Amino acid sequence: MDSKEKLWQEYKRTRSPEIRHQLILSYLWLVKYLAGRLAIKLPACLSQEDLESCGVLGLMEAIDKFDPDRGYDFEAYASTRVRGAMLDEVRRANWMPRTLWYKLQRLRAAREKLENLHQEKASMEAVAREMGVSQAEVHYLDSQFYRLHTLSLDEMVATGNGDPIRLGDLLPDEAIPDPLDRITEEENIELLARAVASLPEKDQLVLALYYQEGLTLKEIGAVLEVSESRVCQLHSRAINRLRKKLAELS
């Protein structure tokens, strides 16, 4: 039995946080590898470090749920969960359907390839041929690109009776919340604030840096002068403590 197998058996028997931390450290390479593979297809609003942060959470979940006695390969098992956590984050950051987003990326890549090759604007026919689709499909995808552009709220549009109206006047006022939703939200915020305030100071700092300041695990490590893996451990501990406090207060 090699060292990793011994580690797994010991973790299954004791559920020791220290052994769990050792397992996380030993498989961090898998998170970085999968993040690197996905990073080439990321939308602009996400970085590889964002993927790694999500991937670490997926790795921790995989470790907690893995049963070494079933004879499965952990790396294959964890890869599915880690990659799934990363893809979920990509989808949350990208509002359009996955299939449409993929087609738009293909369209952009095909157009860039042809224009770099011929040093001139690519025709719709050439792009369609490069993608292996009809010109009508290229025309449709182009129209979806235009939908991504920001519209002016001062633009005038016609109403049902033909009278023009400012586009901005048709939008609901998000500054006026529903009273019931506001009360519920205020109660939840107050409960969360009380739970966070009851945590140790270091836990509060880690949560504030991650969720309020939006720092990555690597950046938090630089602030606290500890390793990224140590931040991962601190974040996991803080979340577990916060859940217990919320359960006690609710």
Image (cartoon, rainbow, N blue to C red):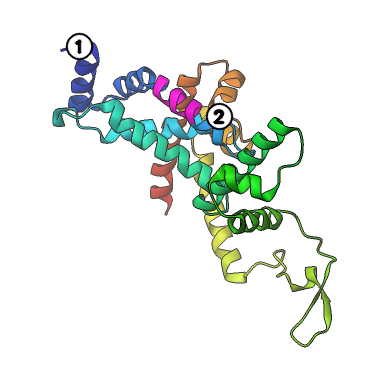
Whether residue 106 sits left or right of residue 86 in the image: it is: right
Whether residue 66 sits left or right of residue 118 in the image: it is: left
For disc 2, the marked residue is: 48
Q: Residue at x 55, y 36 (%)?
A: 41
* In magenta segment, residue 30: yes
Q: Is residue 193 visible?
A: no
Q: Position of residue 223 (x, y in %)?
A: 61, 21
Q: SS at mark 1?
A: loop
Q: Quadrant of residue 175?
A: bottom right
In depth, the one of 20 and 165 nearer the eye is 165
Comparing marks 2 and 1, which lies closer to the viewer? 2
Instruction: Tell me where the magenta segment starts and ends, as one range.
Output: 29-37
Query: Mark 2 is on which residue type?
Result: Gln
For disc 1, the marked residue is: 2
Q: Residue at x 44, y 23 (%)?
A: 33
Q: SS at mark 2?
A: helix
Q: Position of residue 197 (x, y in %)?
A: 54, 40
**Position of 160 relative to 228 (above/below):** below
Neighbor class of circle 1 (other Cα within 10 Å; few <14, some 14-19, many 20+) is few
Query: Mark 1 is on which residue type?
Result: Asp
Name the dominant secondary structure of the magenta segment. Answer: helix
In depth, the one of 106 and 210 nearer the eye is 106
Label 2, label 1: how far apart the Cα atoms are: 32 Å
Q: Residue at x 38, y 19 (%)?
A: 25
Q: Confirm or deny contact between disc 2 and disc 1 (CB under 8 A).
A: no
* In magenta segment, residue 4: no
Quadrant occupied by the N terminus: top left
Q: Position of residue 45 (x, y in %)?
A: 63, 39
